[in-house]
Image: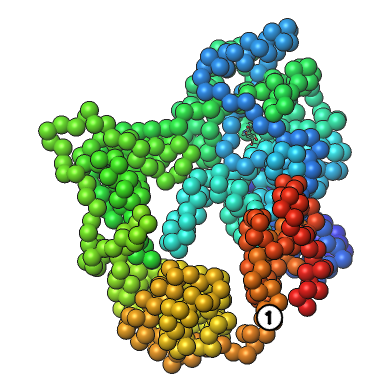
Amino acid sequence: MTVKEKIDQLRADLHRHNYNYYVLNAPEISDKEFDDRMRELQELEKEHPEYQDDNSPTMRVGSDLNKNFTQVAHKYPMLSLGNTYSESEVTDFYDRVKKALNEDFEICCELKYDGTSISLTYENGKLVRAVTRGDGEKGDDVTDNVKTIRTIPLVLHGSYPELFEIRGEILMPWEVFEELNREKEAREEPLFANPRNAASGTLKLQNSAIVASRKLDAYLYYLLGEELPCDGHYENLQAAAGWGFKTSEHMKKAHSLEEVFEYIRYWDTERKNLPVATDGIVLKVNSMRQQKNLGFTAKSPRWAIAYKFQAERALTRLNKVTYQVGRTGAVTPVANLDPVQLSGTIVKRASLHNADIIEGLDLHIGDMVYVEKGGEIIPKITGVDKDARSMLIGEKVKFITHCPECGSKLIRYEGEAAHYCPNETSCPPQIKGKIEHFISRKAMNIDGLGPETVDMFYRLGLIKNTADLYQLTADDIKNLDRMGEKSAENIIKGIEASKEVPFERVLFALGIRFVGETVAKKIAKSFNDIDELENANLEKLINIDEIGEKIAQSILTYFANPLNRELIERLKSTGLQLYRREEDLSGYTDKLAGQSIVISGVFTHHSRDEYKELIEKNGGKNVGSISAKTSFILAGENMGPAKLEKAHKLGIKLMSEDEFLTLIS
Ligand code: IVH
């Protein structure tokens, strides 16, 4: 067998096993065998780049190359559906169709999947493009990201039309979504509100390798093209399933209004057992010929309609309110409830956000409270059933005055809703959070260490602050739970390597309140070393571009604490870059000093992030939206019409990529 034949065979095999596993749920080989074959193919492809193929199963692994999305016009506009909320509106729709067609018709009933819509184009059986809905006329080309979704076929089987589009919904299954949010919670990152946001956010990530790790799924529900196999929409989708697509197994043809209602009533409760989010039912006239007759209004088809389920609400008892302390010391009140079934999960806890919300609800322990999910995953309390209050009602909920973890008196900053525990240096969740932030990718990027390991080290008393990390030895940790010689060495190596991390990132890693990445960069540019920063007064600090009084105050407060100063001394003595090296400054100029620059469109020489970095390195400021204060727009290809018009109206100059590069060179 030639190498080419071997590659072709592996590709065909892997496509088939992928389909068996992900679409049919009926694997024929073990995961290990699958991985082994995938690895074999990856190696052969690496050795033989001449046989590269954009639709190889290896494309599913994604790549960490950054890219900006190109906008692509939809061949057929992507319309939305008219929404209805009651059975009588559904009856109206049915009667309108009946009257307009004046002949027998079938209605295809489907679930309305609550994700983000996608349009896929296939040419000669290969996926050539995947485009988001965008504004309906044009969307973002997210092909590389979509290729990582295992249920979307890259290559089709059977007899399919030469050219067609198929549309559907990209979803993040509940299970994946909940896991992702748990991870985010552990890292104290903002959570995704619901699987829809998580799916669309993931699809727009620049790094397709991360997309691949997020385990998205897709259901296809609409076939478009000039040469479709059948007149029936339902039958077309059955055919598409035969070519390798994942379509919904819950589609059903109805022949009367009563059958439509049966479907709606059944799924209103049964949908809670589905692995993905749904927010309604879609009703479509089945015959494409009849669809054509009915046509479209400006916004939506006359042949289809959505029926939306009501947001779910449950009534349950509030048992107590507990408080969580985060890395920054922010204290979140959490309602502890009698367990109650809501949208497919059992809810025991709901966020109460802050003291004002509690006050607004006039909450008492023992109250019967309304909990809602309404598309949001983190349940919230939306009201109190005051009529249910009896003589036995408990105390009014009063926000705590002292930290539940360390006992410090809480403070509330002016203009902020949250309460904070000010004990930054010895409140356990704050210490752990600070260490987690310190080791994170954008800070010291310490390989091999994660939140769980930090938690274990902290619990065992091995570390109490970030400087303690540098005192650890492999011997200290190799016998710990789930550790071993190899991982212990890796951790120590990672810690050692972090001594090369430049000043600006070390500053960010310290976790000074309000000192994010950008501010840290500005500070690193303005001071030679940490001692200079430590001795700076308010005036000197607010003279730095982008540093206002709030940030300056926070820096002063940080250094006023002797424990922080002691920590810095220890970090200094371990050899961290707490000073600026000559090479850190190379590439920095003042050429764009005082200029506010908007980046818009698609670029060829550098990515958007690189341009942002270039603007900052040259003393400029990258801003998000165009205003009278914008100095110029760094304009790539395909700038949106609304932005163009605004720039024109305000008389703001557009600068091309090449002009910009010349300007700063
Ligand atoms: S059909 C022209 N079918 O709902 C009609 N849409 O507001 C094309 N959706 O943007 C859409 N499940 O994202 C159709 N079974 C289904 C659907 C569905 C979810 C979404 C889709 C669309 C929106 C309509």
Q: Position of residue 594 (x, y in %)?
A: 64, 71
Q: Position of residue 9 (x, y in %)?
A: 80, 56
**Can residue 501 be seen here?**
no
Above or below residue 197? Residue 3 is: below
User: Which quarter of the rendered image does ligand 1 occupy?
Assistant: top right
Residue 385's image quarter? Answer: top left
Which residue matches tag 1? 589
In the image: residue 392, left or right of residue 357: left
Q: Assign a secondary structure to mark 1.
A: loop
Q: Nearer the viewer, residue 46 or 466?
A: 466
For the N terminus, which image quadrant?
bottom right
In the image: residue 24, left or right of residue 153: left
Residue at 42% x, 87% y: name it. Answer: 535
Q: Nearer the viewer, residue 272 or 543?
A: 543
**Can residue 2 be seen here?**
yes
Above or below residue 92? Residue 124 is: below
Q: Nearer the viewer, residue 216 or 513?
A: 513
Q: Position of residue 494 (x, y in %)?
A: 52, 81
Extreme-left residue of the structure: 391
Above or below residue 558? Residue 89 is: above
Residue at 62% x, 13% y: name it. Answer: 94
Above or below residue 168? Residue 45 is: below
Q: Position of residue 506 (x, y in %)?
A: 50, 80
In the image: residue 319, left or right of residue 93: left
Q: Residues within 10 Å of mark 1 (few under 14, many from 20)?
A: some
Badge 1 amino acid? Thr
